[in-house]
Amino acid sequence: MDDELYMERALALAKKGAGRVNPNPLVGAVIVKDGRIIGEGYHQVYGGPHAEVNAFNSLTEESAGSTMYVTLEPCAHYGKTPPCVDGVIAGGVVRVVIASLDPNPLVAGKSVKKMEESGIEVCVGVLKEAADKLNEVFFHYITHKTPYVVMKYAMTADGKIATHTGKSRWITGETAREKVHQDRNFYTGIMVGVGTVLADDPMLDCRTGGRNPIRIICDTQLKTPKTARVVTTAHQQPTWLLTACLDEGRMAPYLEAGCQIIQVKTKEGHLDLKSAMVILGERGIDGILLEGGATLNASMLTAGLIQKVQTYIAPKLFGGSLAPSPIGGAGIDEPDAAYQLTDTTMTPLGDDICIESYVLKEQKPCLQES
């Protein structure tokens, strides 16, 4: 029971690094001796000391004979910092309790083996489910090299994301919108299509005091208005335009405004989104909050690029056969062909509800682009 108690503290510490350590994992560490916490820390910023080092740096007494609780297996390789496992061994820790093993091939059980060979007792799997969920972005990114994508949309109780005139502000209330901004801090990138830019002229920033995400605009023909806020504020918050346009003259104003232009090949007249994800992964984008309209949502889902779905539902009705729903495209032919969602949770947010589900990995494609 004590193991779970101290691991809960380590997980709480790990969460403090949200939005600051990407693409590294969120990690917390607690050092306990004779039933007392004598040191604790978390990974605070990318490139900075890891959780274990910060825990040792906060010691109130010698760590010899202590137990360390850490949410992720200590690193075993040289990166921007030395291997944490060596520090754990040198610190005289006699027992290490780990929540999750690190899927990084440079670690992947090597630290456990090294500690056990040094005489340290190692226990793995305490609060593993919670630790795995905390680092689901990192686990996906380190194994697939592409971003973890969360499709987020807000809709009315009758499934509309806008009125028949295209107006959508505001569907949900303040509490729900605050959570969205917390997620914008958490994920490295935020993605929309050019249609959303044309319709709403959004800022796509974080207004809760966190880190602004990198704005990623899918714009095949480079139609983003040069007066759009994502362009005019590109020096303050990064804006990346994914496009198939090769016209240097058309690209020049965006580059002068501070935007980055990323060339992506096309597939059937649209951006090849699978190729785009590979490119973004190579550029360090580990996670994306997809706030696209119905067309981009359908394309991403069809391409099999969505890992999680966030559905915000407001207790109101728009009606209208022409009012858009969250997923566009042609849709499915038969109910049995639907995309299946799993591990669903529901969270009340003021008068609204947030439903989070994971896209079942093993299923046949069923949507077609219109």
Image (spheres, rainbow, N blue to C red):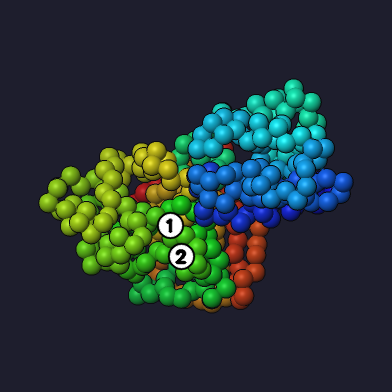
Residue under circle 2?
206
| Foreground of the two, 325 or 282 | 282
Q: Residue at x 35, y 75 (%)?
A: 165
Residue 24 percent location from the top left of the image: 53, 43
The disc at residue 54 is: none
| Image position of 237 (left or right of 94) | left
The answer to whether any part of residue 337 appears in the image is no
Q: Nearer the viewer, residue 23 or 242?
A: 23
The x, y position of residue 75, in whole percent, is 61, 34
Task: Choose the circle earlier in sequence order: 1 or 2.
Answer: 2
Q: Is residue 270 left or right of residue 8?
A: left
- Is 194 placed left or right of 333 in the picture? left
User: Mark 1 touching mark 2, by CB under 8 A?
Assistant: yes
Q: Nearer the viewer, residue 61 or 106?
A: 61
Res. 213 mark: 1
Q: Amino acid at mark 1?
A: Pro
Residue 295, relative to residue 273: is it above or below?
A: below
Residue at (23, 63) in percent of width and height: 225
Q: Quadrant of residue 278?
A: top left
Label 2: how many Cα within 10 Å (few below 14, some 14–19, many 20+): some
Establish if 96 lies above or below 134: above
Q: Secondary structure at mark 2?
A: loop
- Report the residue at 16% width, 53% height from top: 252
For residue 265, side relative to residue 306 (left or right): left
To which quarter of the image does residue 354 belong? Answer: bottom right
Residue at the spot 69% in from the left edge and 44% down from the top edge: 56
Asked whether residue 315 is in view, the answer is: yes
